[in-house]
Image (cartoon, rainbow, N blue to C red):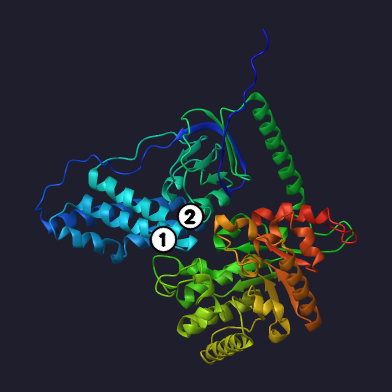
């Protein structure tokens, strides 16, 4: 008899959300929510008693989330703090309380109120708000479980390729990912908190698989690079996947050898490679000798906690810690870049028709000088502890740069009069608005330029960087984007202004040759990308043409 043909597995195409390769049993997640078949609520219940039940369940949910905070890194803790802040915001519970006044029970009122808000988030034009719907679902289910007394279904998730409608951030954080595994979700978003966590932990993730009927328990191959899920693969598909995994491991080992070495091209051109940092806690596991400094500190991490806007002392301690870690290497701290996809409670506008083109970055800081002055004072106090550079985001007109410099000078004068140690620092700007990139000569007052390739690309291509449907258009390799970067670099050199790039493109090996061809000699990348960035640079000969 002829051999049985080795049939191909079932293939499902989704949207990449976190890179990497995973193999393991496919596990269909059970529904997190409290049961819909709960006993029918009685009419005419005591509103005060039901409100008390709801508040008690919310308090228990807050305590549960607070307990989860203990073992989390700063980025993960920020996400849980975001959820706690939402639970403690009266705007979340008020609609449910209004329903309770009609004699409804707490679970029915809470479910109805949250379902309405979740639907509003999912229907939002802005990708950021659509991505936050998962957080609201997380809070809804957690409170419902406390109201019903129903525990989360017990499932061993470690080492599995998890699939379901979506996954909540807290459940992701409660899963042991050290044994491998990945995520293949029918819905979800590349901009969700879960996707951010997956990328930070190296967990492959694919979203947007749609209504695919995924079999529970079958062997699954997940490719977070291409968004492909293969279930019940053939022996040939398994072998090819194993080869890719082995190649990925070899590449990682080779890249690790470059991590601690100075970066230089094959023809001997030195390239500065710095790191982007979102929180001082990231530095605990990093060696300052592996980089040329910190090219971008996203100071937004200080503004997202449940405690509200940070005071001067809290900011000063955080900035000082990073400067001391760098041991004299430059540290570029970006002033608050709120707005767009980074709302800050009590500061950013809640109802902007297009947040990416609205009151964000330096525009927002100048509109709230009382908040900006606090940050400038903290930066001036931190300056004596290292090589500080202060960077302003979303600069569009030279008058904005001039006004920021004036406020920084006033902060220095105030501190000196108060007898507090402080120092001036170079004041530069992100170049992410086409108006600034096209005419750098208008900003000759700046001490340095740093290209924000993420925003610059989305503005040049008119394609939102967080919208999957136009993702192919949002490409830093577009000839118009590269032409603008090259023109900016030449203009900066003519002005005697140093220029670097701190967007994600600097850490993508396929993009680096074109960026260096534009004249860039300084890149700032995610810490995890240090090895691969230096390895990519080492393979480039600037004297040879690049496609």
Quadrant of the drawing holding the N terminus: top right
Whether 532 is drawn above or below 150: the answer is: below
Q: Is 462 placed left or right of 488 in the picture?
A: left
**Residue 339 in sight from this viewpoint:** no
Residue sitting at x 69%, y 62%: 476
> Dot 2: what SS?
helix
The quarter of the displayed image where residue 431 is located: bottom right
Residue sitting at x 50%, y 79%: 364
Whether 182 is drawn above or below 335: the answer is: above
Q: Are marks 2 and 1 in contact (CB under 8 Å)?
A: yes
Residue 143's disc number: none
Q: Is 535 placed left or right of 215 in the picture?
A: right
Residue 438, image x, y percentages: 71, 78
**Residue 169 in sight from this viewpoint:** yes
Residue sitting at x 47%, y 63%: 126
Residue 327, image x, y percentages: 68, 67
Residue 471, image x, y percentages: 60, 57
Alpha-carbon neighbours of circle 2 within 10 Å: few (<14), some, or many (≥20)?
Answer: many
Of the pair 527 and 474, the residue shown nearer to us: 474
Spatial CA distance of label 2 from label 1 is: 10 Å
Residue sitting at x 34%, y 53%: 139
> Dot 1: what SS?
helix
Query: Is label 2 or label 1 in front?
Result: 2
The quarter of the displayed image where residue 118 is located: bottom left
Residue 193's disc number: 2
Residue 187, image x, y percentages: 46, 47
**What residue did someone put label 1 on?**
82
């Amino acid at each position: 008899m002829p051999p049985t043909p080795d049939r191909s597995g079932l293939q499902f195409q989704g949207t990449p959300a976190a890179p990497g390769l995973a193999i393991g049993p496919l596990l269909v997640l059970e529904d997190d929510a409290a049961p819909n078949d709960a006993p029918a609520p009685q009419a005419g219940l005591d509103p005060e008693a039901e409100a008390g039940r709801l508040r008690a369940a919310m308090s228990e949910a807050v305590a549960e989330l607070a307990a989860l905070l203990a073992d989390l890194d700063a980025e993960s803790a920020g996400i849980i703090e975001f959820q706690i802040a939402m639970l403690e915001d009266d705007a979340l519970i008020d609609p449910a309380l209004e329903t309770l006044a009609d004699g409804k029970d707490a679970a029915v009122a809470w479910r109805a109120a949250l379902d309405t808000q979740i639907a509003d988030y999912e229907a939002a034009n802005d990708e950021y708000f659509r991505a936050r719907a998962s957080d609201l679902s997380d809070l809804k289910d957690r409170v419902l479980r406390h109201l019903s007394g129903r525990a989360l279904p017990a499932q061993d998730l470690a080492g599995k390729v998890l699939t379901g409608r979506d996954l909540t951030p807290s459940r992701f954080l409660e899963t042991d990912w050290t044994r491998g595994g990945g995520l293949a979700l029918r819905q979800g978003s590349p901009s969700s908190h879960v996707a951010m966590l997956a990328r930070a932990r190296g967990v492959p993730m694919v979203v947007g698989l749609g209504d695919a009927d995924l079999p529970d328990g079958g062997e699954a191959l997940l490719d977070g690079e291409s968004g492909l899920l293969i279930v019940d693969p053939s022996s040939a598909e398994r072998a090819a996947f194993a080869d890719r995994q082995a190649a990925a491991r070899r590449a990682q080992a080779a890249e690790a050898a470059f991590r601690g070495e100075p970066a230089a091209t094959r023809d001997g051109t030195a390239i500065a490679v710095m790191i982007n940092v979102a929180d001082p806690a990231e530095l605990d596991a990093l060696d300052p000798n592996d980089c040329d400094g910190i090219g971008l500190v996203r100071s937004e991490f200080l503004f997202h906690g449940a405690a509200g806007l940070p005071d001067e002392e809290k900011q000063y301690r955080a900035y000082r810690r990073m400067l001391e870690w760098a041991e004299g290497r430059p540290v570029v701290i970006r002033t608050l870049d709120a707005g767009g996809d980074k709302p800050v409670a009590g500061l950013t506008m809640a109802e902007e028709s297009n947040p990416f083109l609205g009151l964000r970055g330096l525009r927002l800081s100048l509109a709230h000088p009382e908040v900006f002055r606090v940050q400038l004072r903290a930066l001036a106090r931190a300056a004596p502890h290292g090589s500080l550079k202060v960077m302003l985001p979303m600069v569009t007109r030279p008058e904005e740069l001039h006004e920021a410099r004036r406020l920084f000078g006033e902060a220095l004068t105030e501190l000196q009069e108060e007898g507090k140690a402080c120092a001036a620092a170079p004041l530069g700007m992100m170049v992410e608005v086409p108006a600034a990139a096209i005419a750098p000569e208008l900003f000759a007052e700046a001490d340095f330029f740093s290209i924000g390739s993420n925003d610059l690309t989305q503005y040049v291509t008119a394609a939102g960087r967080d919208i999957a449907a136009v993702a192919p258009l949002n490409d830093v390799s577009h000839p118009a984007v590269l032409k603008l970067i090259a023109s900016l670099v030449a203009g900066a050199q003519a002005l005697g202004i140093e220029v670097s790039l701190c967007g994600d493109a600097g850490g993508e090996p396929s993009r680096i040759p074109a960026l260096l061809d534009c004249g860039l000699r300084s890149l700032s990348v995610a810490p995890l990308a240090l090895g691969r960035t230096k390895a990519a640079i080492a393979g480039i000969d600037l004297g040879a043409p690049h496609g």
